[in-house]
Image (cartoon, rainbow, N blue to C red):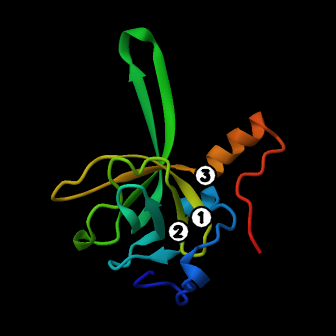
Amino acid sequence: MHPHPQGGSSFKYPVGGLLQVKGVVKEDEISKPNQLDANGEACLIVIKNGKTTGATIGRATGIESFVREYGDHGISGTSMEVAVYPLSHKDGAFSAPGDSGSIVVTGQGSIVGMLTGRAGATESTDVTYLTPYFWLEERIKQAVPKSYLYPTVD
């Protein structure tokens, strides 16, 4: 799944073609990924199965934070997002309208985030945004302490 892994690839095609979700990628691993893309740049190689685009592979490059100010109304908001790019320029977009809400995972099945939007394809770039799952999980568990968010099957 990754063209230049550090220490070799750990991806194994899952039995029956279904990748079991196993935990959540934490903030430090998203901020300082330990995989390399085809250009030798640090990233997390991620995969999702969206309603519109089906299964696609991309490169998560870290956490971005955006602050929005709404002028005269005195309203501001901060969002925390992970930027995901296509694996390469020839692979096409990572996501399209209708893919929102898809869970994005690593090749080992760890949840990186939930797809929330995209900047749209251009000749130079295509960016998909994920809300980090560790961040979502913290807020859900504050509201519903006994919630169990990703059951496993043995």
Badge 1 is on which residue? Answer: 29
Q: Quadrant of the C terminus?
A: bottom right
Sort mark 1 into few (<14), some (14-19) or many (20+) by Cα contacts within 10 Å: few
- The three-letter amino acid code for the residue at tag 2 is Pro
Q: Quadrant of the N terminus?
A: bottom left
The alpha-carbon separation of the residues under discs 1 and 3 comes to 12 Å
Using residue 122 as the reference point, say whether residue 80 is left or right of it.
right
- The three-letter amino acid code for the residue at tag 1 is Glu
Using residue 71 as the reference point, say whether residue 77 is left or right of it.
right
Indicate which disc residue 125 carries.
none
Point out the frontmost of discs 1 and 3.
3
**Residue 109 image-quadrant placement:** bottom right
Sort mark 2 into few (<14), some (14-19) or many (20+) by Cα contacts within 10 Å: some
- The three-letter amino acid code for the residue at tag 3 is Tyr
The residue nearer to you, when weighing 86 against 53, is 53
Badge 2 is on which residue? Answer: 33
